[in-house]
Amino acid sequence: MSPFPARPAPGDQPVLVAGGISDSHTWNLVYLQLLLEEHGHRVVNLGPCVPEDLLIAEALAHRPALIVVSSVNGHGYHDGMRTVTRLREHPGLAAVPAVIGGKLGIAGPCGADEVAALRAAGYDAVFDDSAESVAAFRRMLGTLPQRALV
């Protein structure tokens, strides 16, 4: 018997949802959880104000299919850069898909340069709070393996 937990089968891996370290909002995280569950995914919702060390520990423990970082307070760009940099520094998390979305800038949506910087830092996708981004996020969810129904 291996001392390590068995690797989850595709579709059994949860989606990890977290608020940025400075973002105390929760309804966005509840909405994301419900949306993900409607798309057949198991969700581990870490809540608001998630420190990078906690996100890393939970990601290593759960081996998620996707990490979703959400922001409502407008500091998503800065919080998100720090978060993804820390995630990608960890060898066990370098290949785990990660996305960020919501209100990423206090002056409005991030521009192309900020989106490119978030992508270059390690996010696989960046979504603002527009209807078009919500639709794109939903399409992306359709590409993830879904949980097997029992």
Image (cartoon, rainbow, N blue to C red):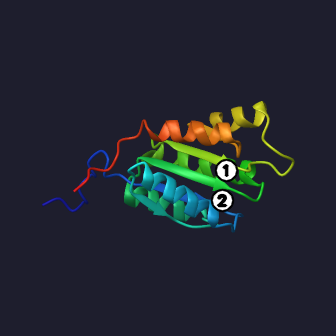
Point out the image quarter for the C terminus: bottom left
Q: Mark 1: which secondary structure?
A: helix
Q: Position of residue 136 (x, y in %)?
A: 58, 36
> Who is closer to the viewer here, 32 or 84?
32
**Residue sitting at the far right:** 107
Under mark 1, the amino acid is Gly
Under mark 2, the amino acid is Gly
Can residue 122 be seen?
Answer: no
Q: Which one is earlier in the sequence, the residue at label 2 or at label 1? A: 2
> In the figure, residue 5 lies in which quadrant?
bottom left
Side of 146 where 68 appears, left or right: right
Q: Which residue is mark 2?
A: 20
Q: Position of residue 29 (x, y in %)?
A: 58, 61
**Measuring 77% from the left and 32% from the top, which residue is drawn there?**
113
**Measuring 51% from the left and 36% from the top, which residue is drawn there?**
139
Q: Which residue is mark 1?
A: 80
Q: Is residue 45 above or below residue 140?
A: below
Q: Are marks 2 and 1 in contact (CB under 8 Å)?
A: yes
> In the figure, residue 62 lies in which quadrant?
bottom left
For disc 1, the neighbor class at 10 Å (few under 14, some 14 to 19, many from 20) is: many
**Measuring 78% from the left and 54% from the top, which residue is drawn there?**
74
> Who is closer to the viewer here, 112 or 37?
37
